[in-house]
Amino acid sequence: MVTIRNEQAADAQAIEQLLDIAFEPSRHGRPSYRLREGVAKRDDLSLVAEVDSKLVGGVRFWPILIGDNPALLLGPIAVHPDHEGHGIGSRLVSAGLDAAKAAGFRLVIAVGAKAYLGRFGFKPASPLGFVFPVPVDDERFLVTELAAGALSGAAGVIRSARGASDKRPKRRVG
């Protein structure tokens, strides 16, 4: 049985090992890591999956800004190779997006496979006027809205929330 729960500090070593297996240690050179440098992940939104009390998957969310508007960066998403193909990654992403929506976030950016993330509503971000701050494959630069109409007028340069990681979205009425 798969258990999804919030990531805890005690999970740090197991998550790093999982990420090394899934993406190799060179993952730190990927474009999305530039936005994460010096920024704390959202602990309330970062989740892990366990099977028989063993950590087998994880997803993290990071605060970013689009202009001055708070948003989230999704990733990394990782599932141990021994547990791939069982829907664990999908459960993690779905639960994380639900938690992000409940926390009042309206937009989530990702750099990943459209074939995978498209099932969660992600679509190419560049044609919608979003700009990633470092070179990235436009086919992998994606955005999804968590609130109807959130994409309207939300375009701009994605930037790190360094120094603004406590910035929470403002609740909108209507």
Image (cartoon, rainbow, N blue to C red):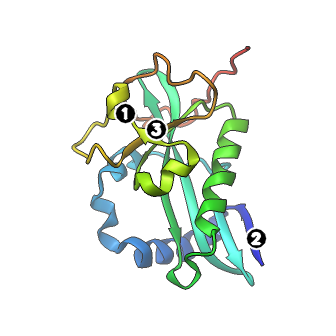
Which residue lies at the image location 46% right of the left edge and 16% below the top edge? 153
Query: Which is in the foreground here, disc 2 or disc 3?
Result: 3
- Give whichever of 77, 119 is nearer the camera: 119
Circle 1: element type: strand
Circle 1 sits on which residue? 159
Circle 3: element type: strand
Point out the image quarter for the N terminus: bottom right
The answer to whether residue 73 is seen in the rendering is: yes
Mark identifier at residue 143: 3
Figure check: 76 above or below 20: above
Mark identifier at residue 42: none
- Dot 1 surroundings within 10 Å: few (below 14), some, or many (20 or more)? many
Which residue lies at the image location 55% right of the left edge and 55% below the top edge? 60
Amino acid under disc 1: Arg
Figure check: 123 above or below 150: below
Decide which of tag 3 and tag 1 comes sooner along the chain.
Answer: 3
Mark identifier at residue 3: 2
Quadrant of the image occupied by residue 57: bottom right
Question: How far separated are the C-alphas under marks 3 and 1?
Answer: 14 Å
Quadrant of the image occupied by residue 6: bottom right
Point out the image quarter for the C terminus: top right
